[in-house]
Image (cartoon, helix red, strand yellow):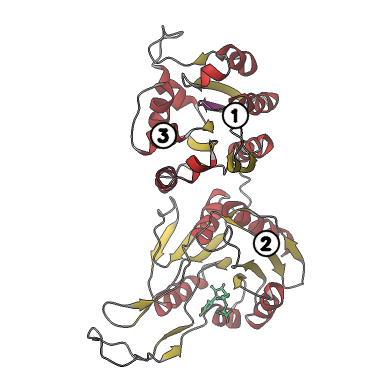
Amino acid sequence: MSKCVVIGVTGGIAVYKALDVISALRKKDIEVHVIMTESASKFVNPLTFQSISQNMVVTDMFAEPKAWEIQHISLAQKADLMLIAPATANIIGKVANGIADDMLSTTIMAAAKAKVIFAPAMNTNMYQNRIVQGNIEKLKSYGYEFIEPASGRLACGDIGIGKLADVNTIVERVLTELSDKEQDLKGKKVLVSAGPTIAPIDPVRYLTNRSTGKMGYAIAEEARDRGAEVILVSGPTNLNPPKNVRIINIKTNEEMKNEIFNNFEWADIVIKSAAVADYKPKEYSKEKIKKGEDDLNICLTRDNDILKSLGDIKTHQVLVGFAAESNDVLKNAEKKLKNKNLDFIVANDITSSDTGFGSEDNKVVIISKNNEKLELEKMSKKEVASNIFDMILEKR
Ligand code: CTP
């Protein structure tokens, strides 16, 4: 059965580029329905979208219905995916704040099964405005996804970020989302660790690190989507727990070690993306430490290297580690691969601000114990996860 994409087009100079996206999707036999906002229809006539999509274009909520259905509900139900391209600051702001006052915003609000992806396009200052960025963060926390705008010369003459992402990038993303994932991990049991651990100092304070858990959660979701049974052992994060994944929340290195060891025998594949604290205060103070006039020294003692212990005892498991490095990335990663007796290591350079800790993307090299290297471009953490499993299935 052919897939159905509902494309929401909002008013901006990039409206015409949505036509190329639709045309590419139609060539793949994907059913496309277009909803235009009133301002979008001032840039390009809806008739053009009608011809390219080969479907009626909806603009007005209260227009005479063409069929006896409530249109915003029926389109929301029909869609396998909703793409808002170009997405203005206005539509992002409306959805983030629960406003549903036209055909497009009501349809987005009524979408339950379909993933909604925004491809923003606007002036650089608008895009970087904290209100817009706050709205984007809020939508991401609710599960809405974004295709980052590109940088370059904008229609207004400014140079900076805010151009609608490249048409090919948008089309690729839509096709990836629509593709039925091959169930090549069916029957496999995958154990993933994610996020930071904390090392308490006293009842108020603790030591931790900058890991947000995004990479590990993406790995757990990818394994689930490909048919695996998944346990995710997670340190404290602000992420929503993935559906259909058994999540075990922990705080300290010791708690993570216990949960990982309890489930190690069960697992076929173990991926340790957590940023585990290597040290903890030698003594935990049961009382809150009071300040004094002098410097305060806290003595730290070594904590468990969980991955190394797993490498020592592994039998049938494929063991994958991460190497967060700020220098000599490959050399240090190869050392860890060997010392910890791993099958694969995923090396990432944590010094770049748009990849690694906290960001949506990552740029990694995956190295196998046979020294095969897969050097990947910067890509979403979900795509990195997909490459990790491809490499495990191919090279093992
Ligand atoms: N790891 C672990 N237990 C630790 C430290 C790390 O299980 N105490 C795991 C991580 O989950 C990761 C891999 O080991 O998969 C490498 O972690 P990383 O922090 O890059 O390396 P370390 O071994 O801690 O070495 P260093 O901090 O000196 O770079």
Rendered position, 37 above or below 246: above
- Of marks 2 and 3, the one in the foreground: 3
Q: How crowded is mark 2: few (under 14 residues within 10 Å), some or many (20 or more)?
A: some
The earlier-in-sequence mark between 1 and 2 is 1
In the image: residue 141, left or right of residue 393: left
Q: What separation in Å lies between label 2 and label 3 (alpha carbons)? A: 34 Å
* Residue 112 numbered tag: 3
Q: Does the residue labelled 1 lie within 8 Å of ligand 1?
A: no
Q: From the viewer's perspective, is 363 left or right of 257?
A: right
Location of the N terminus by quadrant is: top right
- Residue at 40 percent of width and 53 percent of height: 240
Mark 3, mark 1: which one is toward the viewer? 1
- Image quadrant of residue 19? top right
Q: Where is residue 22 in the image (x, y as percent from the top left)?
A: 63, 25
Q: Magenta includes 211?
A: no
Q: For mark 1, what is the residue?
A: 14
Question: Closest to the observer: 292 or 240?
Answer: 292
Q: What is the magenta segment's predominant secondary structure?
A: strand
Give the residue type at disc 3.
Ala
Disc 1 vs disc 2: which is toward the camera?
A: 1
The segment highlighted magenta reads 5-9
Quadrant of the image where one finds ligand 1: bottom right
Q: Residue 91 carries which label?
A: none
What residue type is disc 1 on?
Ala
Q: Mark 3 vs mark 1: which is more N-terminal? A: 1
Front one among 175 and 327: 327
Residue 144 at x, y percent in the picture: 46, 42
**Percent position (x, y) of residue 298?**
37, 90
Which residue is labeled 2 in the image?
A: 392
